[in-house]
Image (cartoon, rainbow, N blue to C red):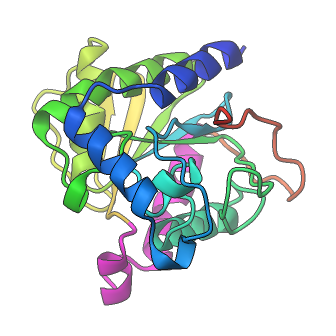
């Protein structure tokens, strides 16, 4: 059975973390100053927990929340262009009940999938320091352990690939030789299949380095490996939401 309580407790622990002084200062500064387009909104301004189906067979891992995306909305990949691209793909592949993700209460549900990041606070310049990554890695390792139905980890970018490998290594599952990241790359680490994808950043999607067809192929492959069958819309599994502020 999915450990819903364990995931909820972990999410609350993540959301209250203040371990990295640089990240705490930056996320809170962004939340105070805000972007002009969101001047009337109250930013989340805290670490962003994972989100999705507690019975997930697929874990999608990104780098970190966006300063005016997840750091604003409190949900990973929500409220920015990268999320628009990712959730549209998840919807096309039957892993989400809707193609958009605008806020924590927008009705989005994932089916068979869970989304997290290696680093839980938005970093300046989108570049976490190694120690900040290492401080966050235990959260990812614990999510992997709590998602007891997990079979596939989709890594969005080389940073996520490296972070997933480090988290699995912390769980006693070392990949030797160390698998190399690439779009569509696969590696079997213990019971988990890692699948690489380019990150859905604006730079990658605007230049055509990552196309909808490319990310769809990765997600279809992940669903196949995980044993997830297509399911009609509207029947997505009920799941928890991130903790309220």
Residue 203 position by quadrant: bottom left
Q: Determine the main secondary structure of the stretch shown in magenta.
A: helix
| Residue 19 sits above or below residue 212 on the image | above
- Is residue 209 inside the magenta stretch? yes
Q: Which residues are magenta?
A: 200-226
Name the one closer to the observer, 136 or 38.
38
Q: Is residue 2 visible?
A: no
Quadrant that contains the N terminus: top right
Residue 167 position by quadrant: top left
- Counting from the top left corner in percent of width and height, residue 21 is at 22, 33
Quadrant that contains the C terminus: top right
Could you tell me which residue is drawn at 56 percent across and 65 percent down? 79
- Is residue 196 inside the magenta stretch? no
- Counting from the top left corner in percent of width and height, residue 216 is at 53, 67
Q: Is residue 50 visible?
A: yes
| Residue 80 sits above or below residue 123 on the image | below
Name the one closer to the observer, 26 or 169.
26
Name the one closer to the observer, 212 or 102.
102
Could you tell me which residue is drawn at 77 percent across and 58 percent down? 106
- Counting from the top left corner in percent of width and height, residue 2 is at 69, 18
Could you tell me which residue is drawn at 52 percent across and 56 percent down? 72
Q: Is residue 209 left or right of residue 33?
A: left
């Amino acid at each position: 059975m999915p450990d819903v309580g364990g995931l909820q407790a972990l999410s609350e622990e993540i959301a209250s973390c203040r371990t990295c002084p640089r990240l705490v200062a930056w996320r809170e500064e962004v939340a105070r100053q805000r972007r002009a387009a969101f001047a009337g909104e109250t930013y989340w301004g805290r670490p962003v927990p994972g989100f999705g189906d507690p019975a997930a067979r697929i874990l999608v891992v990104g780098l970190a929340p966006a300063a005016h995306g997840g750091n604003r909305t409190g949900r990973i990949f929500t409220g920015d262009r990268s999320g628009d691209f990712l959730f549209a793909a998840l919807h096309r592949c039957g892993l989400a009940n809707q193609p958009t993700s605008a806020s924590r209460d927008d009705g989005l549900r994932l089916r068979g999938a869970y989304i997290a990041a290696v680093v839980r606070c938005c970093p300046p310049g989108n570049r976490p320091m190694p120690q900040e990554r290492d401080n966050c890695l235990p959260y990812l390792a614990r999510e992997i352990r709590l998602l007891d139905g997990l079979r596939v980890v989709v890594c969005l970018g080389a940073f996520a690939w490296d972070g997933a490998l480090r988290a699995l290594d912390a769980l006693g599952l070392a990949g030797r030789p160390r698998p190399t990241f690439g779009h569509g790359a696969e590696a079997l680490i213990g019971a988990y299949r890692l699948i690489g994808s380019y990150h859905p950043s604006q730079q990658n999607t605007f230049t055509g380095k990552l196309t909808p067809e490319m990310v769809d192929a990765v997600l279809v492959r992940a669903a196949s490996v995980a044993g997830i069958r297509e399911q009609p819309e509207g029947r997505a599994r009920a799941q928890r939401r991130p903790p309220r502020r």
